[in-house]
Image (cartoon, rainbow, N blue to C red):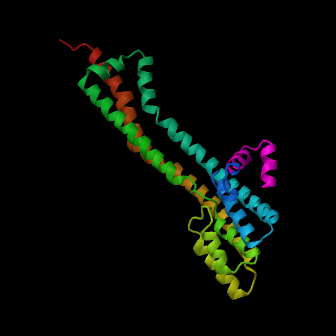
Amino acid sequence: MTAWRHLAESGDGHAERVIARCDEGGELVTEIAAEGGAWADVAAAWEIATTVGAPLAEVLRSLSESLQDAATAADDVRIALAEPTGTARLLLWLPFAGLLLGLALGFDTIGVLMTNPFGAGCVIAGVLLVLAARGWTAALVRRAQPSAGTPGMHAELMSVALAGGAAIPRALQLVERSPASLGDDADRTASVLELSRSAGVPAGELLRASAAQQRQEARVQGRLRAARLSSRLLLPLGACTLPAFLLLGVAPLMLSVLTSTPLPI
Protein backbone atom coordinates (compact mmCIF):
# COMPACT_ATOMS: atom_id res chain seq x y z
CA MET A 1 0.00 0.00 0.00
CA THR A 2 2.89 2.35 0.77
CA ALA A 3 4.26 1.92 -2.75
CA TRP A 4 0.86 2.73 -4.26
CA ARG A 5 0.58 5.86 -2.12
CA HIS A 6 4.03 6.95 -3.31
CA LEU A 7 2.91 6.46 -6.92
CA ALA A 8 -0.27 8.42 -6.25
CA GLU A 9 1.71 11.29 -4.75
CA SER A 10 3.95 11.32 -7.84
CA GLY A 11 0.90 11.98 -10.03
CA ASP A 12 0.18 8.55 -11.50
CA GLY A 13 -3.50 8.52 -12.46
CA HIS A 14 -4.05 4.79 -11.95
CA ALA A 15 -2.46 4.89 -8.50
CA GLU A 16 -4.51 7.92 -7.51
CA ARG A 17 -7.75 6.14 -8.40
CA VAL A 18 -6.68 2.92 -6.66
CA ILE A 19 -5.71 4.75 -3.45
CA ALA A 20 -8.89 6.83 -3.49
CA ARG A 21 -11.04 3.70 -3.67
CA CYS A 22 -8.95 1.93 -1.03
CA ASP A 23 -9.41 4.89 1.33
CA GLU A 24 -13.15 4.41 0.88
CA GLY A 25 -12.88 0.84 2.14
CA GLY A 26 -11.92 -1.13 -0.98
CA GLU A 27 -9.45 -4.01 -1.06
CA LEU A 28 -6.14 -3.25 -2.79
CA VAL A 29 -6.18 -6.22 -5.19
CA THR A 30 -9.83 -5.63 -6.10
CA GLU A 31 -9.23 -1.96 -6.82
CA ILE A 32 -6.14 -2.71 -8.92
CA ALA A 33 -8.16 -5.16 -11.02
CA ALA A 34 -10.92 -2.54 -11.37
CA GLU A 35 -8.54 -0.47 -13.55
CA GLY A 36 -9.05 -3.08 -16.26
CA GLY A 37 -6.75 -4.24 -19.04
CA ALA A 38 -3.27 -5.35 -17.98
CA TRP A 39 -3.97 -4.13 -14.45
CA ALA A 40 -6.09 -7.24 -13.92
CA ASP A 41 -2.94 -9.30 -14.59
CA VAL A 42 -0.99 -7.17 -12.11
CA ALA A 43 -3.72 -7.69 -9.51
CA ALA A 44 -3.70 -11.44 -10.11
CA ALA A 45 0.08 -11.70 -9.74
CA TRP A 46 -0.03 -9.44 -6.66
CA GLU A 47 -2.70 -11.58 -5.01
CA ILE A 48 -1.01 -14.89 -5.76
CA ALA A 49 2.43 -13.66 -4.66
CA THR A 50 1.13 -12.34 -1.35
CA THR A 51 -0.90 -15.52 -0.75
CA VAL A 52 1.95 -17.98 -1.31
CA GLY A 53 4.71 -15.72 0.00
CA ALA A 54 6.62 -15.25 -3.25
CA PRO A 55 9.02 -12.26 -3.43
CA LEU A 56 6.71 -9.50 -4.64
CA ALA A 57 9.44 -7.28 -6.13
CA GLU A 58 10.84 -10.12 -8.22
CA VAL A 59 7.36 -11.17 -9.31
CA LEU A 60 6.42 -7.65 -10.40
CA ARG A 61 9.74 -7.20 -12.23
CA SER A 62 9.20 -10.42 -14.18
CA LEU A 63 5.57 -9.52 -14.82
CA SER A 64 6.49 -6.07 -16.15
CA GLU A 65 8.83 -7.67 -18.69
CA SER A 66 6.08 -10.07 -19.76
CA LEU A 67 3.51 -7.29 -20.10
CA GLN A 68 5.93 -5.13 -22.09
CA ASP A 69 6.59 -8.05 -24.42
CA ALA A 70 2.84 -8.67 -24.81
CA ALA A 71 2.21 -4.97 -25.45
CA THR A 72 4.93 -4.95 -28.12
CA ALA A 73 3.32 -7.95 -29.79
CA ALA A 74 -0.10 -6.24 -29.73
CA ASP A 75 1.42 -3.05 -31.16
CA ASP A 76 3.01 -5.04 -33.99
CA VAL A 77 -0.40 -6.47 -34.86
CA ARG A 78 -2.11 -3.07 -34.75
CA ILE A 79 0.57 -1.56 -36.99
CA ALA A 80 0.19 -4.42 -39.46
CA LEU A 81 -3.60 -3.91 -39.47
CA ALA A 82 -3.42 -0.13 -39.89
CA GLU A 83 -2.72 -0.10 -43.64
CA PRO A 84 -5.42 -2.53 -44.84
CA THR A 85 -7.95 -1.07 -42.40
CA GLY A 86 -7.26 2.52 -43.50
CA THR A 87 -7.43 1.55 -47.17
CA ALA A 88 -10.77 -0.18 -46.65
CA ARG A 89 -12.27 2.84 -44.89
CA LEU A 90 -11.02 5.16 -47.62
CA LEU A 91 -12.51 3.03 -50.38
CA LEU A 92 -15.92 3.15 -48.70
CA TRP A 93 -16.10 6.83 -49.76
CA LEU A 94 -15.39 5.96 -53.40
CA PRO A 95 -19.06 5.86 -54.52
CA PHE A 96 -19.77 9.29 -53.04
CA ALA A 97 -16.57 10.64 -54.59
CA GLY A 98 -17.91 9.57 -57.97
CA LEU A 99 -21.12 11.48 -57.27
CA LEU A 100 -19.16 14.64 -56.41
CA LEU A 101 -17.05 14.19 -59.53
CA GLY A 102 -20.19 14.37 -61.65
CA LEU A 103 -21.17 17.63 -59.98
CA ALA A 104 -17.66 19.02 -60.52
CA LEU A 105 -17.94 18.22 -64.24
CA GLY A 106 -21.15 20.24 -64.45
CA PHE A 107 -23.69 17.42 -64.64
CA ASP A 108 -26.91 17.70 -62.65
CA THR A 109 -26.40 14.30 -61.02
CA ILE A 110 -28.29 15.22 -57.83
CA GLY A 111 -31.33 16.36 -59.80
CA VAL A 112 -31.28 13.20 -61.89
CA LEU A 113 -31.09 11.00 -58.83
CA MET A 114 -33.96 12.82 -57.13
CA THR A 115 -36.35 13.16 -60.07
CA ASN A 116 -35.66 10.17 -62.31
CA PRO A 117 -37.15 6.83 -61.21
CA PHE A 118 -34.06 5.01 -62.43
CA GLY A 119 -31.91 7.50 -60.52
CA ALA A 120 -33.86 6.90 -57.32
CA GLY A 121 -33.35 3.17 -57.77
CA CYS A 122 -29.62 3.75 -58.21
CA VAL A 123 -29.53 5.76 -54.96
CA ILE A 124 -31.33 3.08 -52.97
CA ALA A 125 -29.25 0.22 -54.37
CA GLY A 126 -26.00 2.17 -54.05
CA VAL A 127 -26.60 3.18 -50.43
CA LEU A 128 -27.53 -0.39 -49.51
CA LEU A 129 -24.35 -1.67 -51.11
CA VAL A 130 -22.26 0.93 -49.24
CA LEU A 131 -23.86 -0.10 -45.93
CA ALA A 132 -23.28 -3.76 -46.75
CA ALA A 133 -19.63 -3.04 -47.59
CA ARG A 134 -19.20 -1.11 -44.33
CA GLY A 135 -20.65 -3.92 -42.22
CA TRP A 136 -18.71 -6.60 -44.10
CA THR A 137 -15.44 -4.68 -43.77
CA ALA A 138 -16.01 -4.02 -40.06
CA ALA A 139 -16.63 -7.73 -39.47
CA LEU A 140 -13.42 -8.69 -41.28
CA VAL A 141 -11.41 -6.13 -39.30
CA ARG A 142 -12.90 -7.29 -35.99
CA ARG A 143 -11.97 -10.88 -36.79
CA ALA A 144 -8.38 -9.85 -37.50
CA GLN A 145 -7.95 -7.98 -34.19
CA PRO A 146 -5.86 -9.59 -31.43
CA SER A 147 -7.85 -11.41 -28.78
CA ALA A 148 -8.33 -9.91 -25.34
CA GLY A 149 -5.99 -10.77 -22.53
CA THR A 150 -2.25 -11.28 -22.26
CA PRO A 151 -0.89 -14.37 -24.03
CA GLY A 152 0.83 -16.79 -21.68
CA MET A 153 -0.56 -15.24 -18.50
CA HIS A 154 -1.82 -18.60 -17.21
CA ALA A 155 1.72 -20.00 -17.31
CA GLU A 156 3.16 -16.80 -15.83
CA LEU A 157 0.80 -16.89 -12.85
CA MET A 158 1.49 -20.59 -12.31
CA SER A 159 5.22 -19.86 -12.17
CA VAL A 160 4.52 -17.16 -9.56
CA ALA A 161 2.48 -19.57 -7.41
CA LEU A 162 5.09 -22.32 -7.66
CA ALA A 163 7.89 -19.86 -6.84
CA GLY A 164 6.23 -19.29 -3.48
CA GLY A 165 6.32 -22.99 -2.69
CA ALA A 166 2.67 -23.81 -3.39
CA ALA A 167 1.80 -27.32 -4.51
CA ILE A 168 0.58 -27.72 -8.08
CA PRO A 169 -3.11 -28.34 -7.15
CA ARG A 170 -3.07 -25.30 -4.84
CA ALA A 171 -1.32 -23.20 -7.50
CA LEU A 172 -3.91 -24.18 -10.12
CA GLN A 173 -6.68 -23.24 -7.73
CA LEU A 174 -5.16 -19.81 -7.07
CA VAL A 175 -4.63 -19.10 -10.77
CA GLU A 176 -8.14 -20.11 -11.78
CA ARG A 177 -9.55 -17.90 -9.03
CA SER A 178 -7.48 -14.86 -10.08
CA PRO A 179 -9.03 -11.79 -11.76
CA ALA A 180 -6.76 -12.09 -14.83
CA SER A 181 -8.12 -12.87 -18.29
CA LEU A 182 -6.57 -16.30 -18.88
CA GLY A 183 -8.15 -17.36 -22.17
CA ASP A 184 -7.81 -21.06 -23.00
CA ASP A 185 -4.17 -21.58 -21.99
CA ALA A 186 -4.89 -24.05 -19.18
CA ASP A 187 -4.25 -27.07 -21.43
CA ARG A 188 -0.83 -25.77 -22.47
CA THR A 189 0.07 -25.15 -18.84
CA ALA A 190 -0.99 -28.69 -17.99
CA SER A 191 1.28 -30.02 -20.76
CA VAL A 192 4.23 -28.06 -19.39
CA LEU A 193 3.58 -29.33 -15.88
CA GLU A 194 3.42 -32.91 -17.18
CA LEU A 195 6.72 -32.41 -19.00
CA SER A 196 8.26 -31.01 -15.82
CA ARG A 197 7.06 -34.02 -13.81
CA SER A 198 8.19 -36.63 -16.33
CA ALA A 199 11.59 -34.99 -16.98
CA GLY A 200 12.20 -34.13 -13.34
CA VAL A 201 13.05 -30.47 -14.03
CA PRO A 202 11.75 -27.37 -12.20
CA ALA A 203 8.45 -26.18 -13.63
CA GLY A 204 9.04 -22.46 -13.13
CA GLU A 205 11.53 -21.96 -15.95
CA LEU A 206 9.51 -24.18 -18.28
CA LEU A 207 6.36 -22.18 -17.54
CA ARG A 208 8.07 -18.85 -18.21
CA ALA A 209 9.52 -20.21 -21.46
CA SER A 210 6.07 -21.44 -22.46
CA ALA A 211 4.58 -18.01 -21.73
CA ALA A 212 7.23 -16.33 -23.90
CA GLN A 213 6.54 -18.80 -26.70
CA GLN A 214 2.81 -18.09 -26.50
CA ARG A 215 3.45 -14.35 -26.83
CA GLN A 216 5.67 -14.96 -29.86
CA GLU A 217 2.97 -17.15 -31.42
CA ALA A 218 0.39 -14.43 -30.77
CA ARG A 219 2.64 -11.91 -32.54
CA VAL A 220 3.10 -14.19 -35.56
CA GLN A 221 -0.58 -15.10 -35.77
CA GLY A 222 -1.54 -11.43 -35.58
CA ARG A 223 0.73 -10.56 -38.48
CA LEU A 224 -0.68 -13.45 -40.48
CA ARG A 225 -4.23 -12.25 -39.81
CA ALA A 226 -3.24 -8.76 -40.96
CA ALA A 227 -1.73 -10.18 -44.17
CA ARG A 228 -4.85 -12.23 -44.87
CA LEU A 229 -7.02 -9.20 -44.17
CA SER A 230 -5.45 -7.33 -47.10
CA SER A 231 -6.72 -9.94 -49.54
CA ARG A 232 -10.06 -10.55 -47.82
CA LEU A 233 -10.93 -6.86 -48.02
CA LEU A 234 -11.03 -7.27 -51.80
CA LEU A 235 -14.28 -9.22 -51.38
CA PRO A 236 -16.45 -6.31 -50.14
CA LEU A 237 -14.58 -4.03 -52.55
CA GLY A 238 -15.50 -6.10 -55.60
CA ALA A 239 -18.92 -7.23 -54.46
CA CYS A 240 -20.24 -4.00 -52.93
CA THR A 241 -18.02 -0.91 -53.19
CA LEU A 242 -17.34 -0.96 -56.95
CA PRO A 243 -20.99 -1.70 -57.89
CA ALA A 244 -22.02 1.14 -55.56
CA PHE A 245 -19.55 3.42 -57.33
CA LEU A 246 -21.16 2.52 -60.66
CA LEU A 247 -24.64 3.15 -59.29
CA LEU A 248 -23.87 6.42 -57.48
CA GLY A 249 -21.06 7.78 -59.66
CA VAL A 250 -21.33 6.49 -63.23
CA ALA A 251 -25.07 5.84 -63.62
CA PRO A 252 -26.08 9.43 -62.70
CA LEU A 253 -23.64 10.76 -65.31
CA MET A 254 -25.15 8.52 -67.96
CA LEU A 255 -28.70 9.45 -66.95
CA SER A 256 -27.81 13.15 -66.90
CA VAL A 257 -26.36 12.92 -70.41
CA LEU A 258 -29.35 11.01 -71.71
CA THR A 259 -31.93 13.32 -70.16
CA SER A 260 -30.14 16.49 -71.32
CA THR A 261 -29.72 15.32 -74.91
CA PRO A 262 -32.72 16.32 -77.11
CA LEU A 263 -34.33 13.49 -79.00
CA PRO A 264 -34.06 13.68 -82.81
CA ILE A 265 -37.29 14.58 -84.61
Quadrant assignment for the N terminus: bottom right
Indicate the position of residue 168 as horizontal and vertical percent values: 67, 80
Quarter of the image where the C terminus is located = top left
Residue lying furthest front in this view? Answer: 25
Q: Main secondary structure of the magenta part?
A: helix
| x and y, in percent, of residue 22 in the image | 70, 51
Farthest residue, direction left: 265
Where residue 119 appears, as percent x and y from the top left, is 29, 26
Is residue 73 at least partly visible in the picture? no
In this rendered view, identify the residue nearer to me: 146 or 174: 174
In the displayed structure, 234 sits above or below 70; it is: above
Q: Which residues are magenta?
A: 1-21
Q: Is residue 129 magenta?
A: no
For the residue pair 26 and 55, the one nearer the viewer reads as 26
Using the image, determine if residue 100 lies above or below residue 217: above
Left or right of 127 on screen, residue 263: left
Seen at 70% across and 56% down, the residue is 28
Q: Nearer the viewer, residue 124 or 72?
A: 72
Q: Position of residue 141 (x, y in %)?
A: 51, 48
**Is residue 100 at least partly visible in the picture?**
yes
- Residue 71 vertical placement versus 95 (above, below): below
Q: Could you tell whether 232 is left or right of 222 in the image? A: left
